[in-house]
Amino acid sequence: MHETLLLLKSLAMNFPILHEWGVVFPKIITIVVPTDELWEIKEILKNFPEQCENTNNSDFRFFYISDVKKLNAKAFQLQTELLNGIKTEFGFPLILTDNFNTEGIGNHQFIIFFDEGLSDVNIDNFILYPENGSLQQIKRKIEEYKKKAASVEEFCFLAAKSFIPQRAMATTSEELLIEMIQRLCQQNEDARDVKCVTEMFLNCLYEWQKRKCFGNICHVLEASLFERDTHIFYDDKFIYMGSKLFREITLPLTKYVAITSLKSGLVKDEILIPEKSSSNFTVKVTCRDENGIPQRIRMIRLKEEKINMLGEMSFISICMLAKGDKK
């Protein structure tokens, strides 16, 4: 997440220089994020110092749109302006939306998902400024990337990466960052296709259970707060798990499909059942803390009948067997 945000900030901050060099992102980047994270991501991305020594720096132009039809129309307009060099002096256009129905989003948009945890992100904008005399060196590096990139989008991200010093990447090597950019481009391609998500998720779930011999399961009425990241809870119709456990289960999938796109597909297939008012795919579940006091926490809710394999034991029964109990 940190590296993706750095790339986006670099795209915007160095937009005039990149545009002058003929590096133009061919699509409008559309960030899909839960409603309660919209403010955080805007603050992270927009925090450029008011006074920049380098006058070649730029900022984002933010557009918040929820309706898919309006989103597509605006993105098409912004793409036309971007490719024709119109209004470029106002900054890099970026759409923010909390609409996770990505199947309706047009191909002229590049979709990036952010799920949660943005409140913990802090980026120093000064590290993205080109150092004096370094522009020609950066330009040569960008010209090398142009020969290697598999797509225009990948090339533009690699060009943005060229402005980011290695010290800003913490422990991320250049090789890993390039792999991340390639994965980002692949996830954009997969974002509109959620048809195979259910089958892939179920295979992941059962393979994970078998590999772990997972048996940490109990009825939701017995749920303990300190078990929310290690246990699955259940009732007569649903199973519940924390976001941390869901990410662990779906890790093999999220190398190819953005986790938010995955969740959207599961919602569409009526496997993942969030609250109607929730934009982060969760429901509130009551657990008891160490003092026995009820606490409301958010968890992912899956419909049990939808995750059971035809002709096989139920998923809960398989977990109970691993635990040594019988359902």
Image (tube, rainbow, N blue to C red):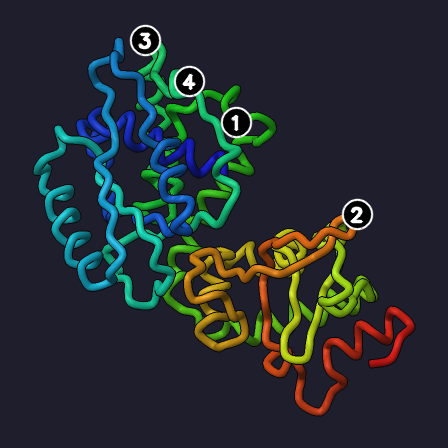
**Amino acid type of the residue that numbered disc 2 sits on in the rendered structure:** Glu
Q: Is residue 205 visible?
A: yes
Instruction: Say whether disc 4 or disc 3 marks the residue closer to the N-terminus.
Output: 4
Residue 192 location, x and y as percent?
37, 65
Residue shown at the point (35%, 21%) measured from the top left: 138
Question: Does residue 143 show up?
Answer: no
Q: Residue at x 79, y 47 (%)?
A: 291
Q: Position of residue 204 (x, y in %)?
A: 65, 67
Q: Earlier in the sequence, mark 1 or mark 4?
A: 4
Give the SS element for disc 4.
helix
Say which of marks 3 and 2 sits in front: 2
Residue at horizontal 62%, vertical 83%? Answer: 305
**Residue 49, image x, y percentages:** 31, 17
Q: Which residue is mark 2?
A: 290
Q: Is label 1 in a helix, a strand or a loop? A: helix
Q: CA distance from mark 2 to mark 1?
A: 39 Å
The residue tagged 3 is 133
Which label was assigned to residue 169?
Answer: 1
**For residue 227, what is the image quadrant?**
bottom right
In this rendering, position of residue 88 left or right of residue 266: left
